[in-house]
Amino acid sequence: MKAIRSVHCQRGSEVVEFAISASLLFILLFGIIEFSVALFDKATLTNASREGARTGILYRPEPRDTATEDAAIEQAIRDYAEQYLISLGGPAAMEITIQRPNGGTLQAGDSLVVTVDYPYQFLLLPAFVGTLGDVLELSATTVMRAE
């Protein structure tokens, strides 16, 4: 009689144990997915800044127009990011900075610096963990020499 009472009192404990362990497992699983997507987006931004820098150091005959070149660099970055960036909130809101020596046109041997800043917005984690904030600032910088 005592053994039956002991089994009856423990009924449902498996459900409570599963609820506790499953919630931790799901938070860990979503964390792995979330940070994997953030790392993928970081690699994508690095490649996008490289594409922009490659576009910027191409040889062009004189006279060179920096406004047209900057537009071509930004378009190359946005095209690459649009194709590969994982952004569930619509188009990526990137900030693109292009730096030339002395602010002028590129000459052979000059370095072109392209920086892309992207506010990565978490998909699920901030709802669970409030200390992360809603946005992680990702940045990529590429320096290439004009030849």
Image: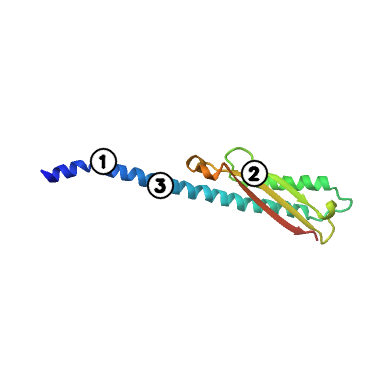
Cα distance between the residues tagged 2 and 3: 34 Å
Question: Reading the chain from its start, which is encountered first: label 3 or label 1?
Answer: 1
Q: Is residue 111 above or below residue 83?
A: below
Cα distance between the residues tagged 2 and 1: 50 Å
User: Residue 40 at x, y = what percent?
Assistant: 57, 51
Quadrant where the C terminus is found in the figure: bottom right
Question: Reading the chain from its start, which is encountered first: label 2 or label 1?
Answer: 1
Is label 1 in a helix, a strand or a loop?
loop
Q: Mark 3 = which residue?
A: 24
In this rendering, the label closer to the viewer, 2 or 3: 3
Is label 2 in a helix, a strand or a loop?
helix
Residue 46 or 118: which is nearer the viewer?
118
Q: Is residue 113 above or below residue 67?
A: below
Q: Mark 2 = which residue?
A: 82
Residue 9 or 124: which is nearer the viewer?
9
Q: Which mark is residue 12?
A: 1
Q: Give the residue drawn at x 67%, y 51%.
A: 48
Q: Is residue 57 above or below residue 7?
A: below
Structural crowding at the residue carrying mark 3, measured as other residues with C-alpha within 10 Å and reported as few (<14), some (14–19) or many (≥20): few
Q: Give the residue drawn at x 64%, y 39%.
A: 91
Which of the 4 image quarters holds residue 18?
top left
User: Residue 8 at x, y = what percent?
Assistant: 18, 41
Amino acid carrying label 3: it is Leu
In this rendering, the label closer to the viewer, 2 or 1: 1
Point out the residue furthest to the right here.
Answer: 63
Amino acid carrying label 2: it is Glu
Question: Reading the chain from its start, which is encountered first: label 2 or label 3?
Answer: 3
User: Residue 60 at x, y = what percent?
Assistant: 83, 53
Is label 3 in a helix, a strand or a loop?
helix
Amino acid carrying label 1: it is Gly
